[in-house]
């Protein structure tokens, strides 16, 4: 910003605030108006000190890619949590769970000494059909 433009903008802010002060109603409201005009004059004075940004300088990441990465991380953590919960429910077993893009369980494999009826009951709690459940008894 060149110096003459700076002087003009500050001068215009001062003159405008003086005119507004003359036109402002008497009373309690006037002091709030003066405060606002004072902020406007200070903003005009500090204008050259603030950095100017153009759209070319701003690096906007690909929002869709960021959302996809976040969703993949959430689904991975969800799958790990479901596997940990399943392994706690069936001690000594290892659980392998598949989830779809909405986080719904699509398949489950339980390896180890687990009661088949209990595993099928648990699969029902996860809204999983019995044909999508595998039980490998490795005793």
Image (cartoon, helix red, strand yellow):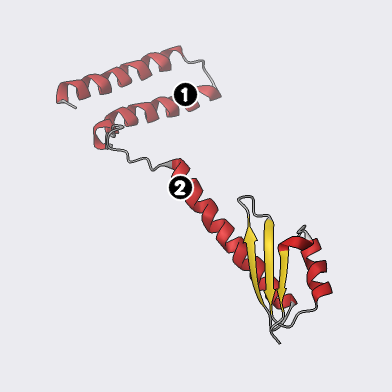
Q: Which mark, residue 8? A: none
- Comparing 109 with 41, the one in front is 109
113 sits left or right of 98 in the view:
right
Q: Which quadrant holds the C terminus?
A: bottom right
Q: Where is residue 79, by image quadrant?
A: bottom right
Going 73% across and 83% down the picture, which residue do you hit?
113
Query: Secondary structure under badge 2?
Result: helix
64 sits left or right of 75 in the view:
left
Q: Position of residue 138 (x, y in %)?
A: 69, 84
112 sits left or right of 49 in the view:
right
Between disc 2 and disc 1, the foreground one is 2
Q: Which mark, residue 66? A: 2
Q: Position of residue 6 (x, y in %)?
A: 21, 24
Query: Secondary structure under badge 1?
Result: helix
Q: Residue furthest left?
A: 3
User: Mark 1 highlights which residue?
Assistant: 33
Q: Is residue 8 above or below residue 112?
A: above
User: Which mark sits nearer the N-terminus, 2 or 1?
Assistant: 1
Going 64% across and 50% down the picture, which residue do you hit?
102
| Number of residues whose C-alpha sits closer than 10 Å to that of mark 1, classed few (under 14), some (14–19) or many (20 or more) | some
Going 63% across and 58% down the picture, which residue do you hit?
99
Cβ atoms under marks 2 and 1 closer than 8 Å = no
Q: Is residue 38 above or below residue 18?
A: below
């Amino acid at each position: 910003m060149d110096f003459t433009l700076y002087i003009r903008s500050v001068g215009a802010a001062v003159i405008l605030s003086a005119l507004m002060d003359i036109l402002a109603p008497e009373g309690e409201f006037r002091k709030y108006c003066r405060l606002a005009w004072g902020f406007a004059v200070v903003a005009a004075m500090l204008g050259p000190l603030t950095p100017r940004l153009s759209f070319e300088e701003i690096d906007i990441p690909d929002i869709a890619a960021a959302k996809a990465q976040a969703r993949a991380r959430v689904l991975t953590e969800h799958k790990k949590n479901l596997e940990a919960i399943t392994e706690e429910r069936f001690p000594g077993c290892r659980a392998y769970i598949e989830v779809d893009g909405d986080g719904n369980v699509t398949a489950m494999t339980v390896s180890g000494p687990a009661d088949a009826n209990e595993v099928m009951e648990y699969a029902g709690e996860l809204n999983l059909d019995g044909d999508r459940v595998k039980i490998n008894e490795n005793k």
